[in-house]
Image: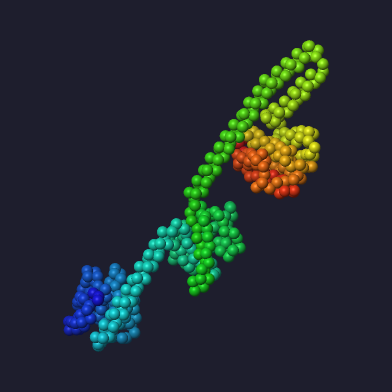
Amino acid sequence: MGKILVAEDSLIVNQHIRRALESGSHNVISAFSGAEAVAEANKQGPDLILMDIMMESSSDGIDAAMEIKETIDIPIIFLTALTDEPTLKKAKISQPYGYVVKPFNEAELLSNIDVALYKAEAEKTIKENSELFQEIINSIDHSIILVDIDNKIKYTNQIAENYLGTSFNNLVNSPIDEFVKMRVDSYNEPVSRILDGDVAIPSEFEIEGSPLIFGDCEIKEVFIKEPCKFLFFKDISDRVKHRKIEEELKTKRVSILIEGQENERERIARDLHDGVGQLANVVKMTAKKLEVGPELTDSIDLFLDEMRKVTDGLLPLRLNDFPLDVCLNGLVDQVDKSSSINFSFSANDVPEVSMNNKINIYRVAQEGISNILKHSRAKNAFIQINGFGDHIQLTIEDDGVGFSKNNSDDTSHHGLQNIFFRSEVMKGNCDIESSEGKGTFISLNIPVDNEEN
């Protein structure tokens, strides 16, 4: 049945107990002092110990039991002829499984042992299951925090303790806001508000005192004697790092693409100016020498004027000589004169910008105006550029037919993509609002601090 260590200094009583236990099919080990009981317990590893409280030695049964408990978790039943309160109070410190009062009968003794062995086995199973559960919980890569209805911490796994930099003993029964200082989008957000549903669950956040970035946050409501909530989140620092690298690479690719487009525009513009333009001028001079009718020279002048418009669109040389708002004003004024749409322009407090950003903002305006001319069927269009200290805002608005983004045609979609690409290169953000029959509004915001002067 079980291996029982009997610690009793009376030889007669010890042997009596041995015979009783062996009749119950138990394997018995005898010890006759507290010190011997400690030695045998460490050596033999019994399933249970019957310990006499008072033994005639320097170490009584209670002292021996406490010494054994420090190293080995073995159930102990005390044998005693004393039932006074001080003795029992001292014995309770070692957390015995029961007491057998002398004199005892064999049936009572065996019954107590069977109950103690069953209880010990049950507690061992519970402990093993608890340890297994704890290992499983700690193997999960999410932080787990359980809070009660008052948002006080009731449980944390090891990962949560590591993230918060303190042990569960310091966390338990404390308000979660006291230890979890959540920072979302550069401001502090009390976790209790998120748990209570007053604030949306953040996709990314930081915790005060930790260099990591957290996410994959979830809240699960459970009922454990009372309503409780589990808060789950994990370290997503590597994911955020990889995302930022991907974004930087994408921005570089777009920047190289746009730079290539600008170089090609410049090459075509110069070829037109230096090649076709010069050839047209030669033809015009030759026509004058030959005294050809004015119809030909007028046609050549018209051709040269149109070519200058094309080359200026490809390579707006005025950007080298004039501020951005002056260049945009000239662009809007030009399309206003040549279009049936009423274009207007305004500018306020526009700061100096780098040439790259100057070109990109100008190209966004060109693209937006081109989309209005091609697709909007608008009566009025309004272009604004304003400086706001830390950023510049360009807006392009029309009262045309608008569009559904999902149903925009390929040409319009390509134009919008160019606007978004240039916005990314400038580390800005672009919003486009449009719906069928209600016109289109484009807003481009470029941070001044990110400019390369």
Q: Quadrant of residue 118?
A: bottom left
Which residue is drawn at the image coordinates 22% and 70% (left, top)? 44
Q: In the rendered view, would you say 335 is above or below 24?
A: above
Q: In the rendered view, would you say 268 is above or below 106?
A: above
The single residue placed furthest to the right in the displayed view is 294
Is 348 left, or right, of 209 in this rendering?
Answer: right
Of residues 444 and 67, the one drawn nearer to the viewer in this rendering: 444
Is 396 left, or right, of 189 in this rendering?
Answer: right
Of the 4 image quadrants, the one containing the C terminus is top right
Estimate the x, y position of residue 440 in percent, counting from the top left: 72, 45
Of residues 42 and 216, the one drawn nearer to the viewer in this rendering: 216
Q: Quadrant of residue 113?
A: bottom left
Q: Quadrant of residue 97?
A: bottom left
Estimate the x, y position of residue 184 in percent, counting from the top left: 57, 55
Which residue is drawn at the image coordinates 57% and 62% (left, top)? 194
Estimate the x, y position of residue 86 in percent, counting from the top left: 33, 83
Is 123 left, or right, of 60 in this rendering?
Answer: right
Is 261 left, or right, of 343 in this rendering?
Answer: left
Of the 4 image quadrants, the one containing the N terminus is bottom left
